[in-house]
Amino acid sequence: MSQSSIQPIAVLCDFDGTITQCEVIGEIYKKFASGNCEQLVRLWTRGEISTLEEIRGCFATIRATQHEMEKELVSITIDPDFPALLDFCRRHGYQFAILSDGLQWYIEFILNRFGISSVTIFANQIQFNPDGFEISFPWYDPKTPKRGTSKPMIIQRYHDMGYQVYFIGDGLSDLEAVHVADKVYAKGRLLDICVDNNLPVIGFSSFADLLNKISV
Ligand SMILES: [Mg+2]
């Protein structure tokens, strides 16, 4: 048996736009942020400011409570085959975790609504205080200064534990992960960037499609 065939596998997956069908944090900003938030998002998209600056700056303009924001989150849908992906990983003994440059709070809230719990999540943190929000970045790495959650750092941790890493993503916060993961499954903007730059990638349109491709 070759080394690679006995190496355990970890499936690490982005959240916004990959598990959900929209950019959740973008929806929160659209509904509740004001002031210079739109400008901060534009600067982030151009790579001119970091996720830390964007999230802290946008949340500083939000006056809504946690409960008011959660009332909006109930309209967010996830890919209907996400539970099937979790099942697939369980049956094959693959580790599964969410790597997100968004906030753990809304990821857990949305997954709970769909009856999904006990998923490992690496994401930025928000604490709701009576006088505002406190945002922290436990997975920050100075080697990826533009991101709050350093996806390459977490992938490297799985490598260090002996795992082969399959990474699934769709957007700009996944760019650095592409260079570190062993296999990349991408859709949306991330897929376009990988194709344009001749980076090895397997495109997918939905988790149903991904499950056909990952099973072989
Ligand atoms: Mg995304």
Image (tube, grey):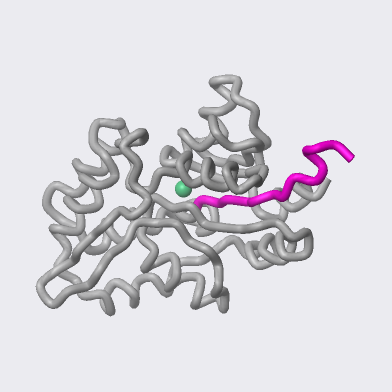
Residue 52 on the magenta span:
no
| Point 47% across, 34% down: residue | 175
Residue at screen point 59% across, 42% down: 159
Task: Identify which residue is drawn at 14% across, 47% down.
Answer: 36
- Percent x, y for residue 131? 10, 73
Q: Residue furthest right?
A: 1
Q: Which image quadrant: the N terminus? A: top right
Residue 10 falls within the magenta-colored stretch: yes
Residue 5 against residue 15 in the figure, above or below = above
Tally of marks: 0
Task: Name the foreground residue: 71 vs 137.
Answer: 137
Residue 112: x %, y % from top left:
50, 76
Q: Quadrant of the C terminus?
A: top right
Q: Nearer the viewer, residue 173 or 93?
A: 93
Left or right relative to 122: residue 7:
right
Instruction: Find residue 123 and report its horizontal and vertical position in percent.
Output: 40, 56
Would residue 121 appear left or right of 39 to someone viewing this image?
right
Q: In the depicted view, which residue is nearer to us: 86 or 136?
A: 136
Locate residue 113 relative to residue 206 in the image: left or right.
left
Q: Say which of 22 and 55 sits in front.
A: 55
Counting from the top left corner in percent of width and height, residue 132 is at 14, 69
The magenta span reads 1-14
For the point 45% across and 57% down, the residue is 122
